[in-house]
Amino acid sequence: MSAPAHDRLFGSGILFQHAKEDVVMPSEYYTRRVGKRLTYLIAYDKGEYFIERDGQMKKAVPDAVATGIDPDEATPSLMRRLAIGDIESLNGMDE
């Protein structure tokens, strides 16, 4: 098993090394409602989100523009909802 994509849990968020800078992002665990019902770790912030399971990065969306969302509309709440949608539909990742 590879090392986790994040450096360590930090309060209610995750400390990521992002562009050579430490960034604490809000995070939460989410369990898929169908299929194998696996639990994923979501880290999200304005304009970006990361999905990890068992210490392996499953999907990274580091830029809202890449998803076609206006950066001004890419709130942390929206990024969280998009991550959950990707988990439920297995969009761009395997279970």
Image (cartoon, rainbow, N blue to C red):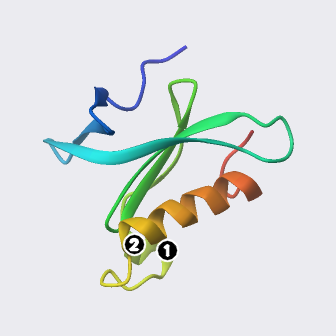
> Type of residue at label 2?
Ala
On screen, 85 above or below 41? below
**Which residue position holds label 2?**
64
**Tag shown at residue 67:** 1
On screen, 87 above or below 4? below
Res. 95 image quadrant = top right
Where residue 57 appears, as percent x and y from the top left, is 51, 37
Judged from the image, the secondary structure of the residue bearing numbered disc 1 is: helix
Where residue 22 appears, as percent x and y from the top left, is 15, 40
> Type of residue at label 1?
Thr
Where residue 56 appears, as percent x and y from the top left, is 53, 29
Query: In the picture provided, is 49 more to the left or to the right than 20?
Result: right
Viewer-proximal residue, 94 or 73?
A: 73
Q: Residue furthest right?
A: 35
Where residue 94 appears, as percent x and y from the top left, is 72, 42
The residue depicted at 29 percent of the width and 47 percent of the height is 25
Viewer-proximal residue, 93 or 16?
A: 16
Res. 10 image quadrant = top left
The residue depicted at 79 percent of the width and 47 percent of the height is 33
**Which quarter of the image is occupied by the N terminus?**
top right
Res. 11 image quadrant = top left
